[in-house]
Amino acid sequence: MAKKSMVAREVKRQRLVTKYAGKRAELKAIVADQDRPMEERFKASLKLAELPRNSSAVRLHNRCQLTGRPHAYYRKLKLSRIMLRELASFGQIPGMVKSSW
């Protein structure tokens, strides 16, 4: 089980990302638009830099939904390898069976 503070920090980052997603997208579009004047693009980049760092989606880290483990994470299932194996052993994941030969 991951530290509760790390999981809480990740939840806080996720909230900030969703809160500022629209504003970040608008500012990035202005900065990337070559047809706009240079001063306007520079001001947009300064405004983008003033936004909280944790509002950037790059700072998010995938974590297991059940344990909060950050390593060995399967994106499709949103689980770590340990929980995947445990749930599969109990037969709680449809279509997944333990192999033996």
Image (cartoon, rainbow, N blue to C red):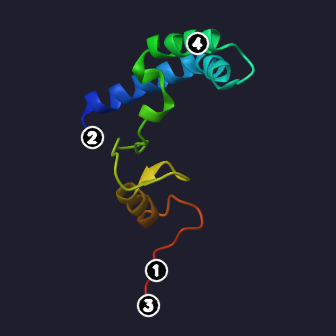
Q: Quadrant location of the N terminus?
A: top left
Q: Which three-letter amino acid code belongs to the residue tagged 3?
A: Trp
Q: Which three-letter amino acid code belongs to the residue tagged 1?
A: Ser
Q: Earlier in the sequence, mark 2 or mark 1?
A: 2
Position of residue 65 in the picture relative to residue 24 (left or right): left
Q: In front of the other: label 2 or label 3?
A: 2
Residue 101, which numbered label? Answer: 3
* CA separation in Å, label 2 and label 3: 34 Å
Look at mark 2 in the image and give the residue it sits on. Answer: 2
Q: Earlier in the sequence, mark 4 or mark 3?
A: 4
Q: Position of residue 69 (x, y in %)?
A: 33, 46
Q: Secondary structure beneath disc 1?
A: loop
Look at mark 1 in the image and give the residue it sits on. Answer: 99
Mark 3, Cα crowd under 10 Å, few <14 / some 14-19 / many 20+, is few
* CA separation in Å, label 2 and label 4: 38 Å
Q: Which three-letter amino acid code belongs to the residue tagged 4?
A: Ala
